[in-house]
Amino acid sequence: MAEKVYYPIGEQDFRALRNDGCLYVDKTGFIRKIIESKEKYFFLSRPRRFGKSLFLSTLQYFFEGERSLFKGLEVDFSDWGWEKFPVIRLDLNTERYEAQGQLEITLESRFNKWELEYGVREKGENLSARLRNIIEAAHSFTGKPVVILVDEYDKPLVNNLNRDENFEHYRARLASLYSNFKSSAEHIRLVFLTGVSRFSKLSVFSDLNNIKDISFSNEFADICGIAENELYSNFKAGIEQLSLKYEVSCEEICRKLKENYDGYRFAEEGSDVYNPWSLLNAMSDCSITNYWNMTGMPTIIAESLKRIDADLKDILNVECERKTLIGLDLKSTDPLALLYQTGYLTIKHYDKEFDTFLLGVPNKEVKEGLFDVLLPYYVKVKRGLVSTTLSEIRNSINRGRPESLMKSLQSYFSGIPYELHMDNENNFHNAFYILVTLLGITSRAEVHTSHGSIDLLIESKDYIYIIELKYDGSPSQALRQIEEKGYALSFRADSRHVFKIGVNFSSKKRTIESWQIK
């Protein structure tokens, strides 16, 4: 009988993970790189649920000298002396920061503990003064410089991007708190911050002009996430279990895992990595389904896209400069940095000549989750009705019923909310693009041919649907374009039946008004 594998779902404490015998993908080689670099200040940006907290926990126990936890891991074979340093770890990921003053509440108990532990006599009048006193006292008390680890340093800012007053309140307090990293440099061995974004208006980055941002580093590309070779070497038992359940080969399971959870890239030359949260859950549940989306999506994403009237097809497959991705600006109307840093877009290609990145959605799981959340912003149909409508559309497609298909599409578009300006064709195309994605079948929008671009191409086992849309036009115009442009020519040798459908969308009625099928 195969030995049971314990997957550390949600476990962010390195000691607990090791003591409980959970599977651990060895990332301690990166600690070795950090200590050998001789740098003092580090920053790492990664999306949520990517293992940032676990890596900070690993750093904590490493600098606290708990060598027994690292037995057999890569860093255990280094010439590190395993001396104990005082570690101050600030975890800002525990609160939502919806009200001002939450930061003080979050840090109060931790500060009290350190002040007692290191014999701080005068607490200080605010968080910044208290932290400064703790750093100096810890160095004096232990004789060792302090290691400072900050988990989700930007959480109060990310949660208040659309609340100007709260954002400024927390920006000022965090800037004051983090100013100690420079003023207390003589007492510090290492500072390591993690977060979603390098905020352009937070002075920690301008003050610490020598901070090493490893977010785009080729050397640290897979410091978080699961690389391809790590999948094969650590998850063999889980892959075999999935293979038995789905009655397919291990090779096919690996293909499905890659399609659903791989595709993240964080450096110019870095390889793709898997989302560790989703991969661990898939192995634990022995099921390939969507997991990351269940952890919640910031409404700021959907609100930002709606606010700027973004064309979803363009913004989710776009080329941009490096500076676009590095920092967030509250006043910026460009959502690319936010989408990249929260994991909804990732690097697909790097152009060395122009120093630009091609961005795209990482994988199937993210795409379906993103569009599922965006749906209510473009189509106001009750959740159950949307599911029913999508099911009807799939059935019509698979059974070769174009008339039924068009009636279901008409029902779907009737749900477009009135506050969306449908004299703007962009909103209609966004609603259509969301539909294509959520169908979960072979469907593509704006398929390019040698003579033009097909608005929508849908393929099933036995049927092909070529759909041309006219906005306040006529179905006959749409059909004529299909014929004149020869959209069906590439399917002449295909044994499947081809349906050509011309469609008119009325901006006044805000739905599909009429269609013709050939």
Image (cartoon, rainbow, N blue to C red):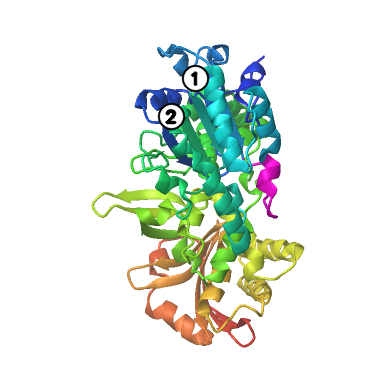
Residue projecting furthest to the front: 122
- Dot 2 lies on which element? helix
- Mark seen at residue 144: 1
User: Where is residue 382 shown, x and y percent of the image?
Assistant: 75, 67
Looking at the rendered structure, the kind of residue marked 1 is: Lys
Q: Is residue 235 left or right of residue 269?
A: right
Picture quadrant where residue 480 is located: bottom left
Name the residue nearer the viewer: 227 or 205: 205
Instruction: State the CA–CA distance, disc 1 to disc 2.
Output: 11 Å
Vertical placement of residue 396 versus 512, above or below: above
Residue 344 lies within the magenta run: no
Residue at 26% in and 49% down = 352
Please give the range of residues in magenta: 92-106
User: Where is residue 278 shown, x and y percent of the image?
Assistant: 60, 39
Quarter that holds the N terminus: top right
Picture quadrant where residue 34 is located: top left
Crowding at dot 2, Cα within 10 Å, few <14 / some 14-19 / many 20+, comes out as: few
- Dot 1 lies on which element? loop
Vertical placement of residue 107 versus 405, above or below: above
Residue at the spot of label 2? 186
User: Where is residue 277 shown, x and y percent of the image?
Assistant: 60, 37
Magenta stretch: helix, strand or loop mostly: loop
Whichever of labels 1 and 2 marks the residue nearer the N terminus, that label is 1
Name the residue nearer the viewer: 321 or 387: 321
Residue at 37% in and 43% down = 209
- Report the number of discs: 2
Residue 189 visible to the viewer? no
Circle 1/circle 2 CB separation < 8 Å: no
